[in-house]
Image: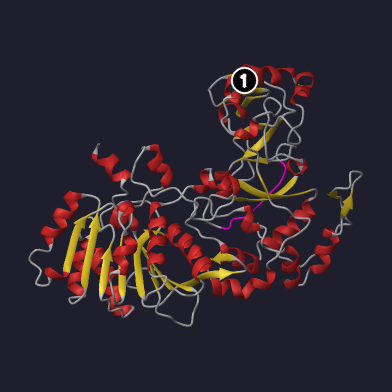
Amino acid sequence: MTKSLEKWQFGDFQTPDELAREVVKTLKLKHKISPKIIIEPSCGKGSFIRASLNEFINSRVIGLDINDKYVEEANLSISEYLNSENATIYQSDFFNTDWKSLISNLSGDILIVGNPPWVTSSELSILNSQNLPLKSNFQNRRGIEAITGSGNFDISEWMFLQYVEWLSKREGTIAVLCKYSVARKVIRQVKKKSGNRFSGYLYLIDAKAYFDASVEACLCILSTHTRSNIDYEIYEDLKAKKASYLIGERDGLIIRDTVKYEKWRHLAGQDLKYLWRSGIKHDCSKVMELENIQGDLFQNGLGVKYTLEENYLYPLLKSSDIGNGRTLTYRKVVLITQKIVGEDTSIIQNKAPKTWQYLNDHEKYLQGRKSSIYKNKPPYSIFGVGSYSFKNWKIAISGLYKKLNFCLVKPLDGKPVIFDDTVNFLSFETEVEAKFIFGLLTSNPSLELLDSMIFWDEKRPITIDILKRLSLKKVAKELGVLENYLQWAESIQINSNGQLEFGLAEQPSHYKVQVHT
């Protein structure tokens, strides 16, 4: 096995001595802990063992690791410590260790410290690794989530929750270096299972500097030593003396900034009319996205030019366009084969024969799409399409960019703009209504409430689930323009099929919301 492959399989990011010393000093000086027993379940080359022997000179220290060479190196590194007899380091596989017996035979306050593997279960499955816990739905996911990618988890998350279980009936502290996203998942699980038994603190660390890893990371501390505040204090770094903000559970959700959330909590809710959508999903950009060369001549992602009718082609703005506010021009068009999901696509043959031939010519690419959503659907189907896709005015925001940058998007070249599926948007019939809602969304109360709920380190931080938690009606009331809002919202009608649809109300003659463009 190559060194890099071995490092991946075991999540092997050795903790620098400097960082281990800083962590242990933080525990001793800032959190005033004085453990009788210190356990490092994946001690590696022993940086936390050495730091613990330096700071807690009378504590018993136990270190385990699966790598026998690391164990040998760790033992050698403490051989000249005056209190080295306090430490026991031996080779053991975490997943095969009888932790219940080991922990039950220890008495006194425990500190569990370390740096569990930074690797996910799916990554290990790709490697056919045996370095995995027994399969169990420990996150309590339901249905298909438990057997698909949604059930993927970080090994460190699983190990961290084992540590929590060890302290379920005894006093102690857990201090773990991990991804910031893992810490939040653990917090959610701990809150669910243990209520407020554990107080919590997160110190952000520079993973790039310490581990050459491009990921948000932290020192996560859970302690059974009680305090009054049930939220978790977040510090910018290990040297910070004051918490920057608090994260915690509110209304069944983990909130990034509970103070800011409490300030605007009264604006939370959902709107019946204004529904957030995601852009078009086609999973075949080389075929479905094209550049206009000249007139009706287009070039696809395969570098081949075609003459196509324009009635199925629409201006396309992608996440990078919206994230950077580029909404007045477009680089590509997208081929939209359906007006609604499941619509018969064969009608394209009569309306646009060149487009139909183009689709036929690239059938192998479109049939090769792996997602199961295309199975048993009309040929060349797309998703994320509906009447809302073809409204002229839209408010859009990139789900990938780490900023609340809402864009007001108008039609381009006489056609409504289409987005890719990483963009979230609202759609409107008229410019006036779009500008009114844009003013509500970009108001300070809206932005602060949304910001309080968004964890910016996520791969896709801005989700529809978060956006729909903001009640535009309540924002309108907060800003004193509720009457104007209701004039738009009351344009709800019932069609012949008994479904809700939204027609045009009489346009408000004025509104007080400032529009930011």
**380 to 81, vertically: above or below:** above
- Residue drawn 89% across the image and 47% down it: 498
Position of 288 with respect to 151 (left or right) is right
Q: Main secondary structure of the magenta part?
A: loop
Image quadrant holding the C terminus, namely bottom right
Position of 118 with respect to 50 (left or right) is right
Image quadrant holding the N terminus, namely top left
Specify the segment rendered in magenta. Answer: 404-411
Query: Which amino acid lies under the numbered mark 1 shown in the image of this protein?
Result: Glu
127 in the magenta segment: no
How crowded pointer 1 is (Cα within 10 Å; few <14, some 14-19, many 20+) is rated as: some
Front residue (pair 313, 512): 313
Front residue (pair 347, 178): 178
Q: Position of residue 363 (x, y in %)?
A: 62, 20
- Residue drawn 74% across the image and 26% down it: 345
Front residue (pair 400, 64): 64
Q: Secondary structure at mark 1?
A: helix
Image quadrant of residue 290? top right
**511 to 157, vertically: above or below:** below
* Residue designated by label 1: 363
**465 to 484, vertically: above or below:** above
406 in the magenta segment: yes
Image quadrant of residue 60? bottom left
Q: Position of residue 47 (x, y in %)?
A: 21, 61
Q: Position of residue 191 (x, y in %)?
A: 51, 68
Say if residue 179 shows up in the picture. yes
